[in-house]
Amino acid sequence: MNFHILSLFPEMVLQGLSTSITGRAAKQGKIHIDAVNIRDFSEDKHRRVDDYPYGGGAGMLMQAQPVYDAWQQVTKPLFSQEKRKVRTIYVTPQGEPFTQKKAEEFAAADDLVILCGHYEGIDERVLEEVVTDYVSIGDYVLTGGELAAMVIVDAVARLVPGVLHNDASAETESFHGNLLEHPQYSRPEVWHEKRVPEVLLSGNQKEVDKWRLEQSVLRTKERRPDLYESYRQMQECKELLMTQKLLHIDMIEAINRGAAQLVYRKGKEILLYHTQAGIFYHTDPEEKEEPYLYEWGEGLCERELSGANTLAQGALPSGAMVSEAMPDCLVLHQERYIAKAEQLFSLKHTMTCSHAVYTKKEKAPVSGLYRPDGKPMGNGLTIQPLHAEHADFVKENYRKMSPEYLAGRIEKGAMFGAFLGEQLAGFAGIHDDGGIGMLFVHPQYRRQKIAQALETYLVNLLLERGMTPYGQIETDNDASLQLQEKLGLYVAKSPVFWLEK
Ligand code: SAM
């Protein structure tokens, strides 16, 4: 990922970010940070970049021209690749508050431009032309945007795959799923006569996890009642969804993984948004003539017609309220709403899938499939994460998803290959919504239990991460449905319905 900082004090940003984890990530090429001095673009013989504000008032203002020229130099090469405006953040106390959610959203970009103001700020006209996001790091006024830019780079960089050695740690930290992190302890066991809580020394991981969750909930309730309220609402939704666990596993897992935003709940009717996958999930277990979904959709259409709704399809832009966004992927959990939803949201019913869910807590047996210690089986088989060099093989052999999506999954460490010696025989992965899928075994290597090995590997990997493994199988794919049942997954009786652009 590339960060481009536009500033009057580039050395401040570069020095600050050159140490510790961001410094190491830059050295390893996982991130790239460049800082451009806006003053280098001044056309004034004294290299001035500021002037008095029209209408009077205290202080000086940064002028439009040097800022614009600096921005153009940085973004020109990027425009030709992407043919669209590069995400450009102006850090300002007038912006939207910077949050973990926003950091996650920014981390999905390849390039981020961050514009730092100074003095009393920047001429409004250039901001209107270049800025896509106005972001504040808090309700206080700094002398310049450099510290704010550093805060953003730090928080975003650590979400880039490979920057933290342990990628799982970014997933379990404070703000994940609206809960603050539990307290942590390290050696010694006793310090200032205070003992580490007994349960953490017990070696019983289940008990440890339970304790940590309880502590997270307590801490959030005490310190951040606002976050706690969102957590509580989501738990209520989860309880409702659990009454049909197999049907709703996609929604339940989105909540468990901290990736769900509640768009609305009306009685038992729920609409969730999956923040990582950009998917809306709807369920309405009680038969109703008019679900609230229709009213919500009609409201969106009216807003669009009146020009008030600028939130078109695609990844939600910064600061967008999910409740105002037109879905471009909607998963319905009841068939009766398909026709009306297609019409309301201009979507097409593309797939009917059944959930296959691994409901046991203990891992699936691996004997005869693969060795969990990573060593080769008798036939030479190992299962390993895939890397960029395998992307072509995956793209050629899996046409159901776009090449960009598959490359992204590989980069996130979510694709795994079955290797026979050096030879890649097949692969499977975890979708951005958390489901297992993208299974392929090369015809030459079929009937050797490779598909079973790959799927069992993913089931056990997800269990290790405390998740419920599940996949979505198209209802006419008998071979896959049979494989799921053979592996001990339960297939839901009622399917779900994918509506897409
Ligand atoms: N007059 C401006 C206003 O009231 O919005 C404040 C200008 S401030 C003194 C100078 C620069 O510091 C801003 O242009 C902005 O880039 C940065 N800055 C100050 N406070 C900030 C904050 N809380 N978050 C992000 N950037 C901030």
Image (cartoon, grey):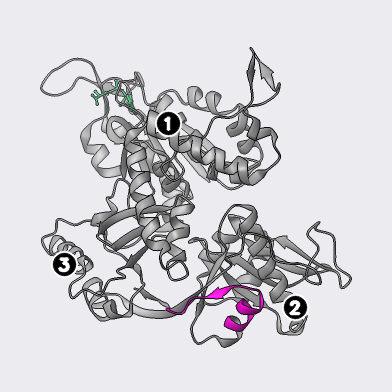
User: Disc 3 marks which amino acid?
Assistant: Glu
Q: Which residue is mark 2?
A: 449
Q: Is residue 482 magenta?
A: yes
Is residue 356 found left or right of 177 in the rendered image?
Answer: right
**Which region is colored magenta?**
481-494
Ligand 1 shown in quarter:
top left
Could you tell me residue 319's position as x and y percent?
30, 45
| C-alpha gap between disc 3 and disc 2 | 50 Å
**Position above or below: 212 against 17:** below
Residue 427 pos. (x, y %): 67, 70
Q: Secondary structure at mark 1?
A: helix
Q: Quadrant of residue 429?
A: bottom right
In this view, the residue in front, 15 or 21, is 21
Residue at mark 1: C-beta within 8 A of ligand 1 = no
Q: Give the crowd class for mark 3: few <14, some 14-19, many >=20 residues within 10 Å.
A: some
Q: Which x, y percent locates residue 264?
A: 26, 56
From the viewer's side, name the closer residue of 398 and 461: 461
Q: Is residue 163 visible?
A: no
| Residue matched to label 3 | 298
Going from N to C along the chain, the mark reached first, 1 or 2, is 1
**Along the horizontal axis of the image, is 2 left or right of 295?**
right
**C-alpha distance separating marks 3 and 1:** 40 Å
Mark 1 — residue? 149
Q: Residue at x 47, y 53 (%)?
A: 256
Tell me how far mark 1 sits from mark 2, CA to CA. Answer: 51 Å
Inspect the image, locate mark 2, and give the three-letter code of the amino acid beneath it: Lys
